[in-house]
């Protein structure tokens, strides 16, 4: 069986937890931040889990994570 290649773009965006789930960062923090409330920006700062429906695709892109 040949080795599988890691999707390098995905490797930079997702992080695996000890329980096997994947963390991702929120979108909407790149520009126009002055118009967004500080409370919203604090919430967007934190990492969140990848949704169950997307987990299969992320695992496929990161075979050795």
Image (tube, rainbow, N blue to C red):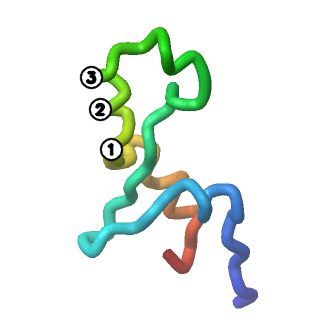
Residue shown at 38% from the left, 55% from the top? 23
Residue shown at 54% from the left, 52% from the top? 57
Q: Secondary structure at mark 2?
A: helix
Percent position of residue 12, x then y: 61, 60
Q: Secondary structure at mark 3?
A: helix
Percent position of residue 39, x then y: 26, 22
Find residue 44 and report its image quarter: top left
- Give the number of the mark in front: 3 or 1: 3
Q: Is residue 22 above or below residue 46?
A: below
State how far apart marks 3 and 2 are (Cα). Answer: 6 Å
Q: Is residue 6 above or below residue 56?
A: below
Q: Which residue is mark 2?
A: 43
Q: Taking 55 as reference, is 11 left or right?
A: right
Residue shown at 54% from the left, 79% from the top? 64
Q: Which residue is mark 3?
A: 39
Residue shown at 70% from the left, 90% from the top? 1
Q: Taking 7 as reference, is 42 left or right?
A: left
Q: Nearer the viewer, residue 43 or 52?
A: 43
Q: Residue furthest front?
A: 34
Find residue 32 and report its image quarter: top right
Between discs 3 and 1, the one toward the N terminus: 3
Q: Are marks 2 and 1 in contact (CB under 8 Å)?
A: yes
Find residue 13 and report its image quarter: bottom right
Q: Which residue is mark 1?
A: 46
Percent position of residue 37, x then y: 34, 14
Q: Residue furthest bottom?
A: 1
Q: Nearer the viewer, residue 9 or 53?
A: 9
State how far apart marks 2 and 1 are (Cα). Answer: 6 Å
Q: Are marks 3 and 1 in contact (CB under 8 Å)?
A: no
């Amino acid at each position: 069986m040949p080795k599988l290649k890691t999707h390098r773009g995905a490797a930079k965006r997702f992080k695996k937890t000890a329980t096997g789930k994947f963390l991702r960062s929120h979108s909407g923090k790149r520009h126009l931040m002055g118009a967004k409330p500080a409370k919203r920006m604090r919430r967007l700062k934190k990492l969140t889990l990848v949704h169950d429906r997307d987990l299969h695709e992320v695992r496929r892109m990161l075979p050795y994570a």
